[in-house]
Amino acid sequence: MMKWAIKASGVQKKNDVLVLGQSGASGISAFRWSKAGFGVKYASPATQYVGTRGASFNSSGTVVAFSHYISPSPYTSISAYPWNNGFGTRYAAPATLPGGSGQGDVCFNSAGSVVALAHNVVKFVSAYVWSNGFGTKYGDPATLPGGAAYGCKFSPAGTAIAVSYAIASPWVSVYAWSSGFGTKYGNPATVPTGVGYGVEFSPSGSAIAVAHDTSPFVSVYPWNPGFGTKYANPATLPAGNGNYVRFSPAGNTIAIGHDTSPFISVYPWSAGFGTKYANPATIPNVGVLNVNFSPSGTEIVCGMGGTVSNIAAYPWNAGFGTQYSNPTLAIASTYGITFKP
């Protein structure tokens, strides 16, 4: 029996599902996942919006949500499905829709009681009560993000929400969260140098990282709560515009997907950047738009914007292993990557 098969008891292994959000009509793809890499592809949702960007499971792995920048009427920008060894019937759209296309992250808080979306116009971030479906939309932040939002993440404790964005400095805003958006925290003393495409809290909640489009392409700060003094840049910078940043589940590794070869840069992390790990033997073939670690931290997956291969996955053990064989995917950019917890 293959490692990714369902156990005799009928209970799935915890981290045997990988879901991708893609541009174009392909939209959403889901695969069984094992230490051997990609397994059998699940059936696509019966009803889905196209042009998917972000993808996120809730903490219990029973719901998966997506952001969209193309969709038919009603123009929802966000969708969600039950997950039970496959996609269930799509939940009804929110009663109050987001104000624009979902061009970035979608995220749940750790309790699974709130789902939030980064989008491109009007208020730039929307959050909803979640209880087996979309509930009431929370009020907008009193101080809005400065422009079209790409990144959106709750802190591990669920007491803050961070949004990274374009148009205007400081490129990242963080708000206290307690049943809604609270007061915006002060800006970092040293702001990121350009458009904030990705934002991420470390698993302990003691650091916050921003991937951005101008050198040094990634900025990381202590978080306590509020921005501390920016950590020193890595000795070897990412090679181009930072599109996404992710900490490993253990918090001892930080990965940045970027636009210039080798397209992925990974560093040890311990209250600062360590020496950059060697590039994978087979580097991604084009700019990496998203990166994620498996829940065990033993694999790393890169989503790319390409017409030849739009995914690259590797074993991870304090360094890249040999790239896994790719599944057959539609020709579309892979923006969203989420593992079932």
Image: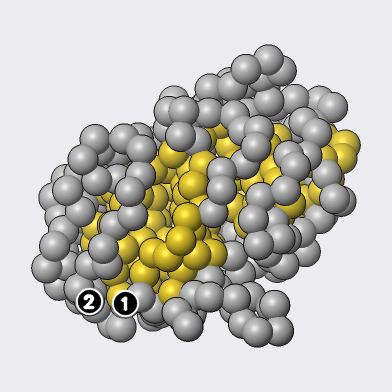
Q: Is residue 227 left or right of residue 198?
A: right
Seen as rendered, the residue at the extreme top is 73
Above/below status of 246 relative to 240: below
Please tell me in which quadrant of the rendered image residue 234 appears.
bottom left
Mark 1 vs 2, N-terminal side: 1
Q: SS of the residue at dot 1?
A: loop
Task: State the residue at coordinates (84%, 27%).
Answer: 95
Q: Is residue 223 left or right of residue 254?
A: right
Can residue 146 be spotted in the picture? Answer: no
Q: Amino acid at mark 1?
A: Trp
The residue beneath circle 1 is 316
Pointer 1: residues within 10 angstroms few (<14), some, or many (20+)?
some
Task: State the residue at coordinates (56%, 43%).
Answer: 44
Q: Is residue 220 left or right of residue 119?
A: left
Q: Amino acid at mark 2?
A: Gly
The residue beneath circle 2 is 321
Above/below status of 40 relative to 103: below
**Residue 123 position in % (x across, y down):** 66, 26
**Residue 137 position in % (x across, y down):** 82, 35
